[in-house]
C-alpha cells in the first residue's frame, strides 16, 4: 500500500448460530438463502444495531465493502410453513383486494430455507475509520437485537471480533470455527470486490485455487437501494469467489475451544477485540 493512501481498517465479525438465512431473491411463498452472508443482510444488521428505522438512509453503510470466509458451510434446511389452516373464514389471511379467502383456499403454504450450523468470518472494510468505530460500538451495545438474515436467527457470541487494521491478513489467518482436523481445510471467500490480493496474506502452507479471483463468477442482487418495507429494493453487484486450502492447525474447534483460540490469536497479535 502506498504511504499516500489512507490505511484500510475492518470490522471482523463472527457469524454463527443454529440457523442463518441470507435471502437474495425471496418472493411471496418461496424464501431462499444464499450459501454465504449477503451485503443486504449485514447492512440491515448494522442499521438495526445503530437504531435506524426501516426506510432511513443507509448510504454510508452501503459504501462498506464485504468479504466473507466460510468456516463451516452448514446444511441447507427447508422449513415448510402453513398459515391460516383450520380457521373460520373471517380469520383467514386477507387477500390483496382486502377480501377473505374461501375455506378451500384458506391455508397458505410457504417454504423457507436456512443454513443450519453454519459459521462465517466476515470483514467489513473501509477507509472511513469513524464510521467503522461507530458501527463497532453499536455492535457492542445494539439498539435493536442483531440477527443473521432473519429475526428468527439470533447469533451466538461473540458477534464482533474487533475493529482491526490490516483486516484481510486477519480474515485469512484467524482461527476457523470448526472441529479440529488432521487434514487441510478447503474454504471459500466471497466478496463484492476482486480477491486477488488475498494471495499476499495467505499462510506459507496454504494452497490457492487456480481460479482468477479478479474476475467475478456471477452476480447477486443484494446491494440495498431502499430498505423501507413497502419500497424494499436492491441492485445487482458482481460476486467474486476465491477458494483456499488452509492448514489443519488453523481449526480452532467449537464452542469454548474456538473462543480460547480466538482470544489467543488476538493476544499474540497485540490486538484489542471482543474475545480478548
Image: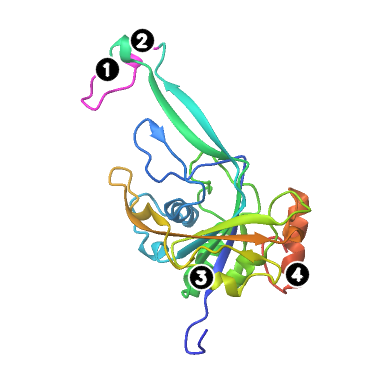
Q: CA distance from mark 1 to mark 2?
A: 10 Å
Which residue is painted at 49% across and 73% down in the image? 130
**Given the current orientation, which residue lies at the most extreme front position?**
210
Q: CA distance from mark 2 to mark 4?
A: 61 Å
Write down the residue under mark 1. Answer: 100
Q: From where the camera sits, is residue 152 visible?
A: no
Q: Secondary structure at mark 2?
A: loop
Percent position (x, y) of residue 57? Answer: 34, 58
* Mark 4 neighbour class, 10 Å CA radius: few under 14, some 14 to 19, many 20 or more: some
Q: Nearer the viewer, residue 142 or 101?
A: 101
Write down the residue under mark 4. Answer: 267
Looking at marks 2 and 4 on the same chain, the residue that comes earlier in the sequence is marked by 2
Quarter holding residue 200: bottom right
Left or right: residue 201 versus residue 8 is right
Q: CA distance from mark 3 to mark 2?
A: 59 Å
Q: Judge whether 164 appears above or below 86 on screen.
A: below
User: Magenta segment: does it hold 96?
Assistant: yes
Write down the residue under mark 2. Answer: 88
Looking at marks 4 and 1 on the same chain, the residue that comes earlier in the sequence is marked by 1
* Mark 1 neighbour class, 10 Å CA radius: few under 14, some 14 to 19, many 20 or more: some
Magenta stretch in the rendered image: 87-99
Write down the residue under mark 3. Answer: 196
Percent position (x, y) of residue 206? Answer: 67, 66
Q: Nearer the viewer, residue 23 or 74?
A: 74
Amino acid at each position: 500500500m502506498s504511504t499516500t493512501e489512507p490505511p484500510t481498517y475492518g470490522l471482523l465479525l463472527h457469524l454463527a448460530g443454529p440457523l442463518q438465512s441470507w435471502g437474495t431473491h425471496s418472493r411471496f411463498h418461496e424464501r431462499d438463502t444464499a450459501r454465504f452472508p449477503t451485503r443486504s443482510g449485514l447492512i440491515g444488521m448494522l442499521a438495526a444495531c445503530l437504531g435506524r428505522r426501516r426506510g432511513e438512509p443507509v448510504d454510508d453503510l452501503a459504501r462498506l465493502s464485504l468479504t466473507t470466509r466460510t468456516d463451516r458451510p452448514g446444511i441447507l434446511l427447508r422449513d415448510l410453513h402453513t398459515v391460516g389452516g383450520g380457521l373460520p373464514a373471517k380469520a383467514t389471511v386477507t387477500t390483496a383486494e382486502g377480501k377473505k379467502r374461501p375455506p378451500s383456499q384458506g391455508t397458505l403454504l410457504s417454504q423457507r430455507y436456512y443454513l443450519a450450523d453454519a459459521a462465517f468470518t466476515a470483514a467489513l472494510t473501509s477507509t472511513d475509520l469513524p464510521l467503522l468505530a461507530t458501527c463497532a460500538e453499536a455492535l457492542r451495545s445494539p439498539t435493536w437485537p442483531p440477527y443473521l438474515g432473519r429475526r428468527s436467527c439470533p447469533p451466538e457470541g461473540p458477534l464482533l471480533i474487533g475493529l482491526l487494521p490490516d483486516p484481510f491478513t486477519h480474515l485469512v489467518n484467524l482461527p476457523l470455527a470448526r472441529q479440529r482436523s488432521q487434514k487441510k481445510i478447503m474454504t471459500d471467500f466471497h466478496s463484492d470486490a476482486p480477491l486477488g490480493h488475498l494471495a499476499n496474506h495467505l499462510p506459507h502452507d496454504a494452497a490457492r485455487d487456480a481460479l482468477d479471483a479478479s474476475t467475478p463468477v456471477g452476480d447477486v442482487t443484494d446491494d440495498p437501494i431502499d430498505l423501507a418495507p413497502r419500497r424494499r429494493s436492491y441492485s445487482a453487484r458482481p460476486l467474486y469467489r476465491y477458494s483456499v486450502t488452509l492448514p489443519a492447525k488453523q481449526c480452532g474447534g467449537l464452542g469454548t475451544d474456538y473462543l480460547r483460540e480466538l482470544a489467543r490469536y488476538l493476544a499474540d497479535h497485540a490486538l484489542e477485540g471482543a474475545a480478548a
